[in-house]
Image: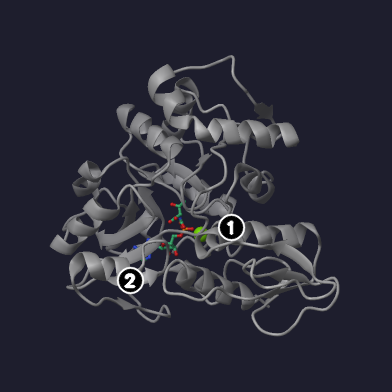
Amino acid sequence: MGTVEGLRVSVELSWAKLINKIGAISSIGLIVRQLAAMTITSNCTASVIKDAATSLIAGNLVAFPTETVYGLGADACNKDAVARIYEVKGRPTNHPLIVHISSINKLDKWAKYIPEYAVKLSRAFWPGPMTLILPRTDLAKDFITGGQNNFGIRVPAHTVALSLLNEFEAQGGIGVVAPSANRFGKVSPTCADDVKSELSDYLNSNDLILDGGPSSIGVESTIINCTDETPVILRPGAITATMINNLLGIRIQSIKKNNNDKIRTPGSLESHYSPIAKVYLTGTPEPGDGFIALRKYPTPAGAIRLISPISNEDYAKNIYRALRLADNLRLKKIFVVAPDGEDIAIAVRDRLHRSAKKRT
Ligand code: TXA
Ligand code: MG
């Protein structure tokens, strides 16, 4: 395990060089684990990426890293492959998926109309942790939009994701749908091993997990509805309302609940992002309970400290890891001091509140 972690760090640091300059490597830290179910590889060389893209075109699933969380990818134009995503995730088929493309230049293939403010947003924040909801062209079929006339799209900011999308497009693909690579309602994965533990029972030997190291942001992209005159945040993320307001010179709204029939966002269900342990946002832990808070808060006597982030960004990056750790330690309760602030702390509080509303 220690070896895998060490190699992963070095692989993450040198992605760009490896893929852009060397093209193919065989002699440096190579880890390919052939599992009973599917392959997980941290050796994301040009040839591995090429094969992964070919596999997507053939209708298989490829889980890949993004800067937000890991996604479970399928060819957005392949109905059967997309059906498998829903099956593997256990997700209701009327919940829409996000299309991932390699660059803003591919946007008008998918979007029927792009408001001026959405053009500005995409220029400012792509590649990056932002999904735009736009009116669809005929390319975005009902089987990815859940029958809605609008759809979500983003350009991720991760070298492995972008390499995969570029190669997929070079081989004739047009877009890759990728929900977070977890079972429906569960915590999103922020590293390849999380994907493996969530989905290995459901993936098959033709499927692949690309290991690109831990996701740098750690919470899902900001979703912005761009189908009206002004943008509305549907899911908070690293691109905040303040950043959007500063860019566009307006005051945008953020909706709290999914109370609009036209827009269906499972991430806005009250109970989502749930670990097995029960999450408490108030109260004091007893000995043996989990505890999550910024480093400045001391650990209550006997509590099990899960993470000690030094900043709100660090909190976002590690929150899902902490919730998973609690489950691995078989803790029953996790007490959380949510972060304050109007930056990415908004997204962390949003996810924590949903985690705390446990399914019955
Ligand atoms: O950061 C992310 O966005 C990650 C990475 C992998 O890109 N993806 C992700 O996908 O979080 P998913 O499917 O787990 O969550 C996407 C959210 C869902 O809540 C979905 O309902 C919403 O986006 N969504 C997708 N299409 C939509 C649409 N047409 N209208 C409203 N919401 C939509
Ligand atoms: Mg998700």
- Find residue 118 and report its image quarter: bottom left
Q: List x then y, in percent, for residue 64.
A: 50, 41
Q: Amino acid at mark 2?
A: Ala
Q: Amino acid at mark 1?
A: Gly
Residue drawn at point x = 38 percent, y = 37 percent: 162
Q: Which mark is residue 318?
A: none
Contact between marks 1 and 2 (CB within 8 A): the answer is no
> Colour mode?
one colour
Residue 117 falls left or right of residue 47: left
Mark 1 vs ligand 2: CB below 8 Å: no
SS at mark 2?
helix
**Residue 325 in the image: x percent, y percent?**
72, 58
Of all residues, the one furthest to the left in this rendering is 116
Closest to the observer, 9 or 89:
9
Q: Is residue 273 left or right of residue 120?
A: right
Nearest to the observer: residue 263 or residue 139: 263
Residue identifier under label 2: 241
Q: Position of residue 290 (x, y in %)?
A: 76, 69
Residue furthest out toward the front: 296
**Considering depth in this image, is 233 or 196 the residue closer to the camera?**
233
Height in image: 249 above or below 307? below
